[in-house]
Image (cartoon, rainbow, N blue to C red):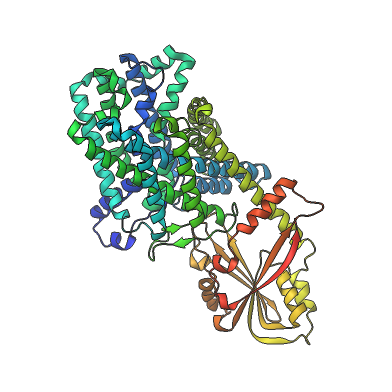
């Protein structure tokens, strides 16, 4: 998953270097580590929620598995290696896929394979993004039942109320409350360390679990029956992908410093403290996290845990907004309304459609599963699937971008993939108990993305199959054609051919503007495009120009701002005397469709949800003329 908070660079640059580093580390702790940081609420507990007895050997074995999963998967794979795979400073599955595609070359097979992996990664995030808020908040609120069973009937109601309130306030942005995320999460990790450390002092023998032989002995003793336990252990590493996804906001050094200096030690102290508690009192395995605290501290701990899980949920929600925005930019999804909730930070965005879909999904999960233990069965498949996708893509980058020898890359990343697939196999055992949900969400996501991409290809072919080359049109344009003053900008996806809107305008109005610009907005597989590389302007003769405006998948596509840059290319454009012509295609089923009937209907339905180009490109509404046409797909 990814999140879309950022640091106030203006304030940061004014601070001394040491103060800047501390501020960025605190900010990173508040955003990057929310998911993995709240895993102690349920990960160790779930290992003993089934038939596994809380014996000394089993406690040592589970703790050893958690420790080495955190060291190998999170620390070695993500913190040491994958943070080096930055795409112009940005991270996340789309950035990694773009980097792999650019470094591996553009052979059809590689392009198809990498595109398929990026689509799979996006789709897996859909399930993860819904389950994380549900399981995190539920597990925190369930701490009230430690005080008294009387609270049990109200757990679901309280959890749903908290999450509904969280989604409702999204439209206002998180810039103000976001400043509290870092301090609250620092308090959270400090609490984890203190609670766990105090219990370790009572039972120091628990530190024997550091020895990886305990993990190996556990796996050898239980054989295939250890797989359900692996399904619980993987809960301890959920959120690992956020370390990479948020690299563009904080940089690799603050994330590495926060992980190695604060987050990892706090997590390990707490997990080992839970293990020590269960060794002393096996009955504590039902709620080991909250039972670490004395009775008087239960309510404050529940409140702090709820705050931490809300912050973790906020990071996932913001990550959903960010990743969806990137997917729209890259043509994976229809255009959507994107509202910027901060005047200074481009990362602060709000997508209404995504927000309400996520809310419905989260509430559905809570009502259907009813508890964090039941949801744990649904958690894991999407996470480990996404981690496996990262392993494959990182292997491609290591060979083609970093120059690693293929056998070395195969050995290392093959080993990572084996670990990922082992955890994924363990999670698959939970399909009947809820694991079907992330698979269903991923399948729906893949179908929607694949349909949209395939439908766009069909539509493009139908629109431009018989299109007239613009050079031919300009060459044959009669001098007697009536030209009116002003500028006409025709938005098109192919500046090499005559737009249908231009032909329709000539047919109905019998005139052309004295200056005609064919404009294409193009997205590249880079996070951002600098202003000096934004435009490509070509003179075609007889008052015609072609204009390509390039944006990265994190850029905000503002056409009027791009047109302001045209002056230095000798093409001054005054919006007061400029008209924008847009072609609006009404899609209808074709008697000989290029798509299966169900996919054709789905694509037409998706196209009707797309935000109109006027709003998406921030065109002045009073200067826009739309010319419609029917197109069979």
Instruction: Give me the residue at 27% from left, 35% from top.
Output: 266
The image position of residue 499, as x and y in percent, is 71, 69
Q: Residue furthest right?
A: 591
The image quarter in which residue 48 lies: top left
Question: Could you say which is closer to the camera, residue 278 or residue 240?
Answer: 278
The image quarter in which residue 274 lies: top left
Q: Please tell me how many numbered marks the rendered image carries.
A: 0
Asked whether, in this view, residue 124 is left or right of residue 178, the answer is right
Quadrant (top left, top right, bottom left, bottom right) of the N terminus: top left
Question: Could you say which is closer to the camera, residue 474 or residue 361?
Answer: 361
* Residue 223 in sight here: yes
Does residue 221 lie above or below 25 as drawn? Answer: above
Question: Could you say which is closer to the camera, residue 276 or residue 566?
Answer: 276
Asked whether, in this view, residue 86 is left or right of residue 284, the answer is right
* Residue 143 in sight here: no
The image position of residue 20, as x and y in percent, is 27, 55
Question: Could you say which is closer to the camera, residue 122 or residue 366?
Answer: 366
Does residue 607 lie above or below 392 as drawn? Answer: below
């Amino acid at each position: 998953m990814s999140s879309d908070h950022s640091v106030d660079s203006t304030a940061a640059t004014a601070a001394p270097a040491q103060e800047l580093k501390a501020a960025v580390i605190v900010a990173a702790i508040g955003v990057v580590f929310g998911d993995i940081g709240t895993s102690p609420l349920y990960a160790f507990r779930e290992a003993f929620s089934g038939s596994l007895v809380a014996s000394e050997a089993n406690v040592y074995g589970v703790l050893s598995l958690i420790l080495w999963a955190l060291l190998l998967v999170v620390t070695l794979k993500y913190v040491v290696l994958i943070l080096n795979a930055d795409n112009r400073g940005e991270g996340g599955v789309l950035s990694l896929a773009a980097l792999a595609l650019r470094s591996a070359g553009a052979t059809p097979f590689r392009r198809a394979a990498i595109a398929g992996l990026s689509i799979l990664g996006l789709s897996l995030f859909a399930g993860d993004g819904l389950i994380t808020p549900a399981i995190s908040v539920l597990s925190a609120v369930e701490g009230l039942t430690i005080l008294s069973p009387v609270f049990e009937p109200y757990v679901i109601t309280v959890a749903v109320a908290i999450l509904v309130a969280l989604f409702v306030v999204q439209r206002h942005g998180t810039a103000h409350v976001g400043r509290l995320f870092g301090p609250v999460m620092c308090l959270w990790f400090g609490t984890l360390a203190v609670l766990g450390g105090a219990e370790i002092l009572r039972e120091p023998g628990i530190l024997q679990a550091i020895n990886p032989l305990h993990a190996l002995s556990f796996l050898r003793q239980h054989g295939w029956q250890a797989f359900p336990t692996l399904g619980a252990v993987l809960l301890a590493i959920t959120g690992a992908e956020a370390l990479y996804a948020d690299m563009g906001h904080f940089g690799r050094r603050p994330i590495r410093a926060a992980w190695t200096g604060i987050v990892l030690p706090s997590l390990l102290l707490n997990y080992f403290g839970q293990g020590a508690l269960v060794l002393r009192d096996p009955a504590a395995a039902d709620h080991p996290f909250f039972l670490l605290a004395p009775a008087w501290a239960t309510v404050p701990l529940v409140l702090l845990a709820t705050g931490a899980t809300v912050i973790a949920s906020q990071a996932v929600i913001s990550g959903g907004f960010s990743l969806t925005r990137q997917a729209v930019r890259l043509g994976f999804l229809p255009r959507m309304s994107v509202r910027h909730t901060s005047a200074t930070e481009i990362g602060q965005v709000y997508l209404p459609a995504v927000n309400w879909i996520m809310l419905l999904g989260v509430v559905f999960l809570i009502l259907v599963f009813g508890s964090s233990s039941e949801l744990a069965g649904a958690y894991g498949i999407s996470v480990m699937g996404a981690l496996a996708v990262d392993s494959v893509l990182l292997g491609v980058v290591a060979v083609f971008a970093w120059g690693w020898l293929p056998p070395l890359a195969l050995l290392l990343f093959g080993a990572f993939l084996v670990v990922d697939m082992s955890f994924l196999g363990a999670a698959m055992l939970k399909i009947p108990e809820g694991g079907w949900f992330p698979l269903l969400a991923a399948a729906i996501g893949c179908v929607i993305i694949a349909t949209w991409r395939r439908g766009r290809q069909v539509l493009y072919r139908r629109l431009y199959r018989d299109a007239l080359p613009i050079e031919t049109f300009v060459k044959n344009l009669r001098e007697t054609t009536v030209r009116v003053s002003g500028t006409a900008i025709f938005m098109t996806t192919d500046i090499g051919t005559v737009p249908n809107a231009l032909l329709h305008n000539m047919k109905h109005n019998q005139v052309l503007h004295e200056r005609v610009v064919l404009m294409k907005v193009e997205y590249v597989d880079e996070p951002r495009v600098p202003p000096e590389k934004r435009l490509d302007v070509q003179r075609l003769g007889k008052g015609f120009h072609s204009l390509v405006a390039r944006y990265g998948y994190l850029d905000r596509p503002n056409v009027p701002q791009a047109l302001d840059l045209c002056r230095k290319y000798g093409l001054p454009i005054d919006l007061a005397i400029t008209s924008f012509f847009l072609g609006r295609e009404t899609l209808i089923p074709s008697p000989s469709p290029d798509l299966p009937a169900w996919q054709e209907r789905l694509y037409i339905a998706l196209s009707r949800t797309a935000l109109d180009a006027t709003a998406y490109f921030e065109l002045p509404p009073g200067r826009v003329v739309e010319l419609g046409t029917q197109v069979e797909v």
